[in-house]
Image (spheres, rainbow, N blue to C red):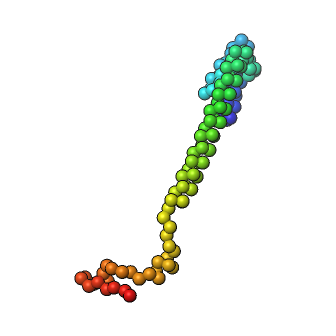
């Protein structure tokens, strides 16, 4: 919005500094306008229709991006749900400590100590 206002301001400045017959064409990314003396908008029907089509296309692109973003969020949530369901079940540390370790060595080389 700020860019649009700047372009209008520039067009108004050119319009007021120019002779009465001068026109200023302001072209932005999506639209084009023609301004005359005093910043008067001089867009003809064809240019207005072109700008309206550009605006509708812009809104449609924004809507499509929003739909794609929502679909990505839903997919990520579904993948997280499936991953949580497929994850192995772990015992909490309290249960694991109650079982004795069998096998391995006690830390001294060559001597294995078994728990009963």
Q: Position of residue 104 (x, y in %)?
A: 31, 79
Q: Residue furthest bottom?
A: 116
Query: In the rendered image, which quarter is residue 28 located in?
Result: top right
Q: In the rendered image of this protein, does residue 66 appear above or below residue 45?
A: below
The front one of 48 and 68 is 68
Q: Residue at x 25, y 82 (%)?
A: 109
Specify the farthest residue to the top.
21
Vertical relation: 63 (above or below) 108: above
For image coordinates 50% across by 62% down, the residue present is 87
Residue 92 appears in the rendering: yes
- Which sits in the foreground, 33 or 7? 33
Rendering coords of residue 2 (x, y %): 67, 35
Looking at the image, which residue is at 71% across and 12% down? Answer: 21
Q: How many marks?
A: 0
Location of the C terminus by quadrant is: bottom left
Determine the image quadrant of residue 35. Answer: top right
* Pick the front one: 106 or 55: 106
The relative height of residue 66 versus residue 8 in the rendered view (above or below) is: below
Quarter placement of the N terminus: top right
Q: Residue furthest left?
A: 110
Asked if residue 107 shows in the view, the reply is no
Q: Position of residue 56 (x, y in %)?
A: 68, 28
* Position of residue 96 measured from the top left corner of the image (x, y, whole percent): 47, 77
Task: Work out whether residue 34 or residue 64 is closer to the camera in this orientation and state it.
Answer: 64
Q: Image point 67% across, 32% down: which residue?
A: 59
């Amino acid at each position: 919005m700020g860019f649009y206002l700047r372009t209008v301001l520039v067009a108004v400045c050119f319009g007021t500094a120019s002779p009465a017959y001068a026109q200023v064409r302001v072209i932005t990314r999506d639209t084009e306008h023609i301004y005359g003396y005093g910043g008067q908008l001089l867009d003809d029907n064809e240019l207005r229709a072109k700008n309206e089509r550009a605006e509708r296309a812009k809104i449609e692109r924004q809507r499509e991006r929003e739909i794609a973003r929502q679909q990505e969020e839903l997919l990520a949530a579904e993948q997280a749900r499936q991953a949580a369901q497929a994850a192995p079940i772990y015992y909490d540390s309290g249960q694991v400590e109650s079982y004795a370790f069998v096998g391995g060595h006690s830390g001294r080389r060559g001597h294995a100590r078994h728990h009963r």
